[in-house]
Amino acid sequence: MSRRWRFVFPALVLVASLLGVWHTLPRLSAMAFIVRVAKPEGALARLARLWAGEVSVAPVPAIPTRHGSVPARSYRPAGAIRRTTLLVPGVHMAGIDEERLVGLARELAASGLAVLTVAPPALLRYRVATESVDELEDVIAWASRRPELAPDGKVGILGFSFSGGLALVAAGRPAVRERVAFALSFGGHADLARVLRYLCGESGSPPPATTGARALVFGAEHIHIPRPNDYGGVVALLNLADRLVPAAQVPPLQDAITRFLQASSLERVDPARAQSLFAQARRQGEDLAEPGRTLMRYVSDREVTKLGESLAPLLATLALPADLSPERASPPAAPVFLLHGADDAVVPASELLWLARDLGSRTRARAFATRLLSHAEVNPRAALVEMWQLAGFWQDVLVR
């Protein structure tokens, strides 16, 4: 090697190494985000915190919509805002105060995205309703027209569970589809009626062209359809109560079911309060006339099979509004991201296959099924590999 190359070659190696590190930095930042959301202990957690920026949290005046105001909260990163993302909880009484939603909002903001958490009121009452889609459309329009939130006139939207499907529908509405930078469904549904049938005992069916659909989903080989969670079946009963019992029984039955769901939401954080609410829900059910009394007994006794059998005849012929199912609505014009737990027992991961097949032919879609979001035990090595792959998914989201 000549004298010149003796100096030039190490310099080229150094430059190549620095370029490689630079190229990897966004993925490492996304990896740090995932670690912070998972909240592990130890050195890895401390290292991930080094990638987190400062975040300021502030209340936002309720956002006006055609159906009334929607509560909101702002999570703002340091510096100028590049992109604001609307973060929508699933069906949960805590709404924008739900602890996992708060944690995710903080970590998204710490990664550079401004976040506006919004909770359509029906979701707080465990209802999946078209009015929530209207409200999300109105919030997209409101936020995208504010230069301090949307410098380029666009916002992102991310919905959890049932609100994931509703967010996709809202993002495809003609009035706002050009105002959406991206839409992310986190454990969302493709067809609400099919999910309700699953929650009541029908197996979660994959699309007819299963092979083609699986090719569109990263991690599709991990998808498993478990026995449905009893929580989901109770939500189904709440939303269908007016079609199952006489009109006079609907309000008291829905009130008892809502109390049971509130207890379920508190079971992990306040067991004593949860048990008190469970007892109240049972007493309310015993005061009902038939058939409400029997249906509420199935709820209180967690008789998923019997509850499903009671709902099955109705679900077999159920016609729901198209605006409740992204599979039946216009797709967003913006890139769509689909993330799902491989063993999800509320909205089965087969819905991810349906969404990927449907949206993949109509818009730009990226779909990811992961065991990291399930309750199954995971091989630690597989977890690290999947975390790195999941970081690539989130990297793509964070730069939108």
Image (tube, rainbow, N blue to C red):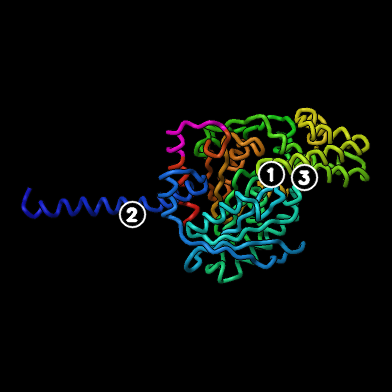
Disc nearer the start of the sequence (2/3): 2
Residue 313 image offset from top left, x and y in percent: 82, 32
Q: Mark 1, mark 3: which one is toward the viewer?
A: 1
Other-residue count near label 2 (Cα within 10 Å), few / some / many at <14 / 14–19 / ≥20: few
Residues under labels 2 and 3: Cα distance?
49 Å
What amino acid type is highlighted by mark number 1? Asp
Secondary structure mostly seen in the magenta stretch:
helix
Q: Which residue is mark 2?
A: 22
Residues under labels 1 and 3: Cα distance?
35 Å
Secondary structure beneath label 2: helix
Give the numbered dot on residue 212: none
Other-residue count near label 1 (Cα within 10 Å), few / some / many at <14 / 14–19 / ≥20: few
Secondary structure beneath label 3: loop
Which span of residues is magenta-colored? 376-386
Residue sitting at 74 percent across and 44 percent down? Answer: 273
Give the numbered dot on residue 320: 3
Q: Residue furthest bottom?
A: 147
Q: Quadrant of residue 187?
A: top right
Residue sitting at 79 percent across and 36 percent down? Answer: 315
Residues under labels 2 and 1: Cα distance?
46 Å
